[in-house]
Amino acid sequence: MRRFLGSLRGQLVLLIIGALMLAQAISLWLFVDERGLAVRAALGAEAAGRAANVARLIEEAPLELQASILRAADSPLVRFDVTSEPAVDHLDHVDRGSVEARMRALLGPKDNRPIRVELHEAEGTLMPMSHINADGTNMHLQMVPGGLLTLEMTVSVGLQDGRWLNVDTRFNRPPLQWPLVSTLSFGITAALLLVAAIWFLLSRLTGPLRRVASAAESFGRGEAPGTLPAMGPREVRDLTVAFNDMQDRLTRHIADRTRVLAALGHDLRSPLTALRVHAEIVDDEDIRVSMISSIEEMQDMVERTLAFARGMATSEEAQTVDMRDFLEKLQQDMHGGFEIGDVGLIHVRLRPNAMRRALRNLIVNAQRYGGGATVSARGGTETVAIEILDSGPGIPQAEMERVFEPFFRLERSRSRNTGGTGLGLSIARTIARAHGGDVRLENRPEGGLIATLVLPRKGSDQS
């Protein structure tokens, strides 16, 4: 789950779903608010209409019938009464005059009688008016659900004889009628369709991105992933094309440099051979031996330079190998030149010939300068570390990185037997970095040196 949430696809899915849920919540809130306004407006208009009609009846009816008219107009939630003073004692309308406007429209444009309206929310259960008897109250409470928002409105209408018609009414906002099963089925269906559509669209985006990332990882380990197909949105296609171009340029650059060095080495062999022939006919033995030694050293340097260039080439196919078997075969090839220490069940992807060459250089250095070598390996979740330990004097801290420079030697003599040519560590690091890893050197506290060749484990069969 954490891996999905950390991916581009997962984050985009959550972002889109979250945005849609927020939009739906805002829409629902607006809908409920508008619905409440509509309900209040409808109920208020109905009460205004009844008040206007009763006011006209009271004014047109004889005095002895007015009480009967008021009783007939009453209901459990509406009460009509005629008094000498208005029940609403202020002129500020909290309903913004909508009820008054409705009543004046019914009474006629020439009617200018005073109309006062008071509307406010009430807490508690929607109770009937006090003039309803106990049986009517109980029946009303059984029919009307509780827990709803109750509104109370009082309207005072001036009559022609100076009296006031007071109308008290109560009503509440009806609940939203959403059946649970229908709502759940609609929500689940909409969510499934939405996720399927988003997943399809994001696959077109994240699929090519994953292929580019995998190809970049393989290319960083020295493998040739080949030309990737340009798929997905335009920006992703542009990225794929740019990666293909970069891969082609780097491959051509390395191949061209290797060919130049190979040609240079081939061209140098002929004059060196000629110099060797001329040196053989020199009469002075000391001069002849010195010249032949220098020519042989030059020939050796040319061969090792070509070997260094081949170490940067990436033509060999990578394979997944068992590290213990790999080290045992290397030990046999070197005729038992080192000891194998602790090596667990580790599988790693590498180019076998190039890696044998890198490890051989590190082991030969340990044998030459440290009196022997012990090779062990340990695997982590991200990397595999191959360690070559010796018991020699180590390397000064200031020279730890300089020893990786081509032709740099700590041993200052010109003898190839004691100091080599100074390319062994350079070749080993070049091969390790071509695999996406590296070579590090560190002095051991108990004495000696430890050379660690680190390889990435991504793309390997981890055990």
Image (spheres, rainbow, N blue to C red):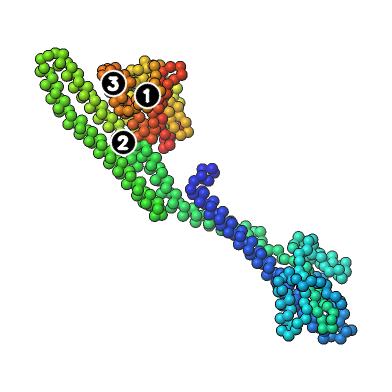
Q: Quadrant of residue 344?
A: top left
Residue occupied by mark 1: 399
Amino acid on which the number 3 mark rests in the picture: Gly
Left or right: residue 62 compared with residue 114: right
Amino acid on which the number 2 mark rests in the picture: Thr
Q: Is residue 11 above or below residue 437?
A: below
Q: Quadrant of residue 284?
A: top left
* Image spot of residue 315 (x, y percent): 29, 36
Q: Are marks 2 and 3 in contact (CB under 8 Å)?
A: no
Closer to us: mark 2 or mark 3?
A: 3
Farthest residue, direction top: 285
Label 3: how many Cα within 10 Å (few below 14, some 14–19, many 20+): many
Q: Give the spatial CA distance, label 1 vs label 2.
A: 29 Å
Q: Give the spatial CA distance, label 1 vs label 3.
A: 17 Å
Q: Nearer the viewer, residue 4 or 463?
A: 4
Q: Secondary structure at mark 1?
A: helix
| Residue 376, disc | none
| Residue 420, disc | 3
Name the residue located 41 percent from the left edge and 54 percent from the top edge.
Answer: 233
Name the residue located 43 percent from the left edge and 53 percent from the top edge.
Answer: 204
Left or right: residue 176 compared with residue 13: right
Label 2: how many Cα within 10 Å (few below 14, some 14–19, many 20+): many
Q: Is residue 439 above or below residue 149?
A: above
Q: Nearer the viewer, residue 213 or 449?
A: 449
* Image spot of residue 37 (x, y percent): 68, 68
Residue occupied by mark 2: 314
